[in-house]
Structures are given as C-alpha cells and as structure tokens.
Image (cartoon, rainbow, N blue to C red):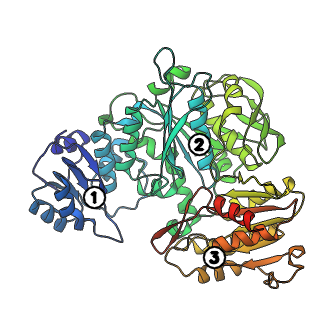
Amino acid sequence: MRFQDTFTQAGVEPSRIEGDAEVARWTTDSRQVGRGDCFVCMPSDNTDSHQFLGGAREAGAVAAVVHSEAGFTLARSFGLATAFIEPGTQPLLEGPTSSETPEQRIRRTTGQFSDALWRLAKVAFGDPSSKLIVFGVTGTNGKTTTAWLIRDIMNLLGVPCAYIGTLGFGLPHLPLSSSGERGLGCEGHWDEELRPLANTTPFTIELNAMLAEAVARGCKAVAMEVSSHALAERRSEGVEFDVAVFTNLSQDHLDYHGSMEAYEAAKLRLFTHLPLSASDSSRGEGVGGWGATSPRLGGLSGERGPRAVVNIDDPLGAKWIEEGALSWAQDFGFTRYHRCDVSGREISIGLDRIELEIDLRNDYSGQTQGEAIVEVPLGGGFNAMNVLAATSAVIAAGIHLDQLVEVLPHVRPVPGRFEPVPNDAGIGIIVDYAHTPDALDKLLETARPLTKGRIITVFGCGGDRDKSKRPLMAKAAERGSDIVVVTSDNPRTEDPDAIIADILAGLPTPQPPPLEDDSISRRGGVWIEPDRPAAVALAVKLAEPGDCVIIAGKGHENYQIIGRTKVPMDDRELAREGLKQR
C-alpha cells in the first residue's frame, strides 16, 4: 500500500506529510528495517528515536513517521516519505464526555501519536484482529495462566489459537486432518513456536504484525494478555476483542500508575474504552462496541457480541458487577457457588492436579448447561481460579461444558507457574513467577497444605520498579514461610543491597547465625544472600525431606537483568544445580 493511502484509509491527518512510496512493512525497530519498509520513530523518555533514521534509510526504508519538526526535517533530508504526528499532551486515561459519540471521541484524539498509530496499524496490516476470535485477559495476577489455558483449550478443540503475553508470542504448528484442515482432532497434542517479547503486550505496530502473522499461519483465534501499561498507553487500542477477562486487582505497578485508582482505571479500559475504538465506521461492518454482533464468533454459538467475563470473588470485580460499571458481564467465582453465571467448587487440589466441579447457570445465550466435574493437570489451589477464568472465557465464546470436560485433562502446565522441579531428595521444589505481595501470599497459602514439613521461600524484588511493594513482599514471605532467603531478582540499574534493605524493612525477624552452625537446618529465620544462584543453593541445602522450597519471582525467565544486560539464569536450573551440591 502507498504510504499516503494508509493515512487516508485510516482517517489520520498528520501535522505534515510529504513524499510518497509503496510500503512493504511497518516497524518501530530500526534493527528490523528492510527494503521498502516504513520506520516509525516512537516517542521515548530515554532515547530520541529520530537518531536511527539514517540507519533505517541505509537498511532500505522508504518512509518514516516522526514525532517532531526536527525529526521531519531529518527524515526528509534522507529522502524518506515522511509524516509528522504531534505526540499530544492529552491525559491517557481521559474518557469520553457524556455528550460525545464514540466517533467524536476518536476524532478528537486522532492528533495524538498513540491514537493515530493504532489506526494506521490496523490499515497497514489488513485489520488482522477482525479475522480472529480475540481473547483479552487483564488483571494483576493470573493473566499468563488464564491466557495460556484459553490457548490450549481452543487448540485442543481444533480452533488454531495463538498466544501473546509474558511467555512470548506463540504460534501453534497444527497437524493437517484427513480433510486438509489444520486442527487437533483427537490427537490432543501439538508443537509450538514461542518467541520472547520485550513487553507483555507489544506496542501497536508489533502487535498488529503478530496478529497478521497469526492469520497468515492459519490461526482462527488468539489469547493475549493485556497489561495495565498497554491499556494506559493505548497499545492495544483498535484490537477488536471478542471476549475480555478480568482476573483480579492487587497492588503492583504503582511506580507507573501513581495510585490504585489510576491502576484500576487502566484495567477498566479493556471493558469500557477499547470497544469504542472498534466502533469507528471506517473500520467496517460488524465490529461495533460491546453488545454488537461479532461475526467471528457466529460459527460457535449463533449471533454473538463482544463479551466481558469478570471474577466476582475479587472485590473490584464484585464492585464493577454490583455497582453497574459491568453489570451486564458474565461473572465467575467460587464463593457464590450456584449463584454465579459460572461457579466452581474445589474437589481435590494437589501439587500437579486439580479436580473441580463447574456449575454453569447461565451463559451469554441465556442457556443453562448444568454441572460437570473436570480434572486439570495443574497444581495448586490458586490455579483453580485460573482454570475457572479460562473456562468462563471459552464458554462466553460459545464452547459447551461437555466439550471442556473432554479437553481440560490434556492442557499443559504453564512454564514457571507453580512448576515443580522433580528430584530424589524427598523435598518439594516449586518455581513460580509470583512477584507481587498478593501473588506471593496466594502461592504460599497454596503450598502450605500440600507440604508435610517446612516451607523455605527464596525471593527478591525487581529494581527500577515499585519500591512500595518491597516490604509488603517481605511480610507475605514471612507470614507464609518457616525460613526466608532474601536475594536479588532483576536488580536492573539499582544497587542490589539497596533493594534488599527496602525488603528487610518489612521483616522484623533478625538474620540467623552463619550456615556453619550445624543446628541451622532446624531453626527458622531470615537469610540474606544477594547472589541468586547461591541463595537458591542455600535454600536447597537447608531443606530436609518433607520440606518445600519455593523459588519465587522469575518463573519462566531464563535470564537476570543486571544494569541493562540480560545475564543467562534460570531458577529451574539453579534448583537442579543446588540438588547436585547437597
């Protein structure tokens, strides 16, 4: 598509635009620029991205989108077709006024760089989200597991489903059926390509590129995590979500949002603002706001509209349901069994398996489907809620309960989420991504009834992130553990010792005597070891048969960020090395 035609079709009027060219691809990464590409210079507090225009031109770029007059002049000097879009100063979380239409709101904010960019991305990549059943999952905890489970369920049902989130970008390599269609049938397994991502929810250009790739690879659905950062920054604006899921809200990211109120407002955008983006008439028919017909879901359960699925056991979810913000949503939970639209009851919980009874009283079609007992190969009580969230999401998309009974036993555990490290030492070792006070509380509460002996917890806190949660993490660790080992997480540019000092402010227990003391394995206490490999080895050494070592904070990550460098490191491998050293 021609550069200027993209702006015309997107309805975006830049402050200045000169030159034209046929554009092969759009990208924000100058290192990925190829011949015929458009390089988008993203605004940044850290770097002036216009400095990469020369390199982009040398790599073959033919066009550029810039965010300053100086950038415009520079891009034109390189002979690039160039559009200048003002960055804009309007607050990111400002919603529509009571008198304006969604279309008026979109046009009012079009001048902002972020709002213009999502409109351009939809056109440049062929509006890929309109060709997929899109599940969006937001919440402080549980996003990854819920999205991963949705992806697994849909794939097992023969609906090829991609994944975008903390674990990366996942595309299924599905076998061909006898009819030549891509699907799983009754095989119950598949190979998958999983690429790491810089952000849980990519920026709009990269996000639309991934959605377009998913379409090209034959996917019919995508399950994606939608972070509060992405919602506040409008990275996922314009994505036509069919089912949006809220898991829970607890303290996190206050360094970014500033207050819990702003954090809540960002999460709510998935349900109240983003659908307005898809209702612009220039986006085509059948993609209106919540409650409009969605042809992508029509094949599953008749006439469909975008759906909201909300955890009513969470105080915020209950408030949204009961006070009217999301009174029309499908709710799910455990505490109101037989009173939620989708409710659950725990039958048995183990380290590697959950058995639940699910009661479906009312789905979006108004039909009651009854009760069913399901078995899922995931461990831990908190995963019961994640299973219920994923189940509720696919039910909202039109999947029937009897179908779920068939496929749930075949879903796969999520890497780094309550992931056991098998061993012959008689000790339990669990690696988990829990990095918020609430997540750590739930993790340790889950492990306690499954542990015969003591719980030994290894954790740290990330640098250059919310400092207020550090003492709260410490309190959670001490509440749920017999022994605590405080260490480094991803210190980034902060001094690890300073981070640990912030953590220790929440720990009244004094540091125990040196390890050389032969009686230490029988004492409780708090250990301090800034070196993470040494800290994990210490925890494993302290453990006795029947104990459980919880290694929290990094989960699936196979690196540690020191300064701005990623150093190879994997908690699962550290645990295995610690076992060798016992």
Q: Is residue 290 above or below residue 140?
A: above
Tell me the kind of residue under disc 3: Asp
On the picture, is 86 further left or further right than 216?
left
Does the image show residue 438?
A: no
Q: Image point 51% across, 54% down: which residue? A: 227
Task: Say what secondary structure mark 1 lies in.
Answer: helix
Tell me the kind of residue under disc 1: Ser
Query: Badge 3: how crowded within 10 Å, few (<14), some, or many (20+)?
Result: few
Pick whichever of labels 3 and 2 is earlier in the sequence: 2
Residue beneath disc 2? 148
Where's residue 350, x and y in %? 81, 45
On the picture, is 288 further left or further right than 580?
left
Q: Is residue 462 above or below residue 59?
A: below
Where's residue 579, x and y in %? 74, 63
Residue beneath disc 3? 531
Task: Say what secondary structure mark 3 lies in.
Answer: loop
Residue 360, disc: none
Residue 30, disc: 1
Pick whichever of labels 3 and 1 is earlier in the sequence: 1
